[in-house]
Image (tube, rainbow, N blue to C red):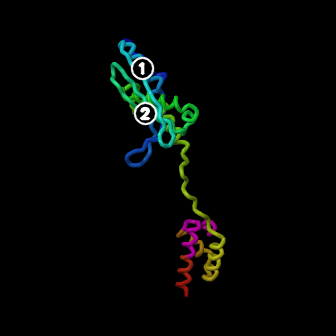
Amino acid sequence: MEKKDYSKFIQKLTHKQRQEDGSYKTVTNEYMMVDGRVKEFTDIHKEQGKKFKFSRKFEKDQEGNLICYAKVYSQIFGVVEASAGAYGQTMVDKSNPYENAETSAYGRCLGFFGIGLLGGGIATAEEVKDALDRQEKVEIPQPKKEEKITPLQSKYIHKLSEELTLKDEDYLRILQDNFKVTSSADLTKSQASKFIDILKGYRQNAS
């Protein structure tokens, strides 16, 4: 019997995969689309002269999201059930919630039968792509930028340096040794507070 070619239904998807040490590695896996799983499933039954049946029902959860409960009966594989929801997080969910939930649920059923599994898990190409699209839309929090030195801090630093009659080279050395900068204007707000404490320490030792 000639082996069927389902390569046109296969998509390669790249994503970040978390490693055991907490780092992320870029991996590419192959996933079969739902229509590819359906075709492979129906081809197997036609070749063996066996019957199959698809059925589904829709319900809404407490949040009002549409859930599809699908069941597939096969004279070859038996009976399997799966569910999938349309949560309005993608354009497909918003425009065709019934179709999207139904497609995902049937795709999972066939995956449980072992149809169209390519090493990337039960999820179909459509489900993985939707998940990656949602992930890209999630705003990654940026590290908080340090506030710059305030005008009040600048004035106080100038006042302290005058009281101490610091030479320019001594003033510069303190900045470089403690903060790796050559001007107090380059200090952050927290660094300026530390610099003030250092100058106060010099003043106390001088008295």
Q: Which residue is mark 1?
A: 40
Q: Is residue 62 above or below residue 183?
A: above
Q: Position of residue 4 (x, y in %)?
A: 42, 16
Total numbered badges shown on the rendered structure: 2
The residue positioned 36% from the left and 15% from the top of the image is 50
18 or 60: which is nearer to us? Answer: 60
The residue positioned 51% from the left and 40% from the top of the image is 64
User: Which of disc 1 and disc 2 is earlier in sequence?
Assistant: 1
From the viewer's perspective, tell me whether residue 95 is left or right of residue 79: right
68 or 193: which is nearer to us? Answer: 68
From the viewer's perspective, tell me whether residue 109 is left or right of residue 140: left
Instruction: Indicate the quadrant where residue 57 lies.
Output: top left
Q: Is residue 32 above or below residue 15?
A: above
Q: Which residues are magenta?
A: 179-196
| Label 2 Cα crowd, 10 Å radius (few <14 / some 14-19 / many 20+) | many
Q: Amino acid at mark 1?
A: Glu
Secondary structure of residue under mark 2: strand
Q: Amino acid at mark 2?
A: Ser
Q: Is residue 125 above or below residue 150?
A: above
From the viewer's perspective, tell me whether residue 115 is left or right of residue 154: left
The residue positioned 64% from the left and 79% from the top of the image is 159
Residue 195 among those drawn in magenta: yes
Q: Which residue is mark 2?
A: 83
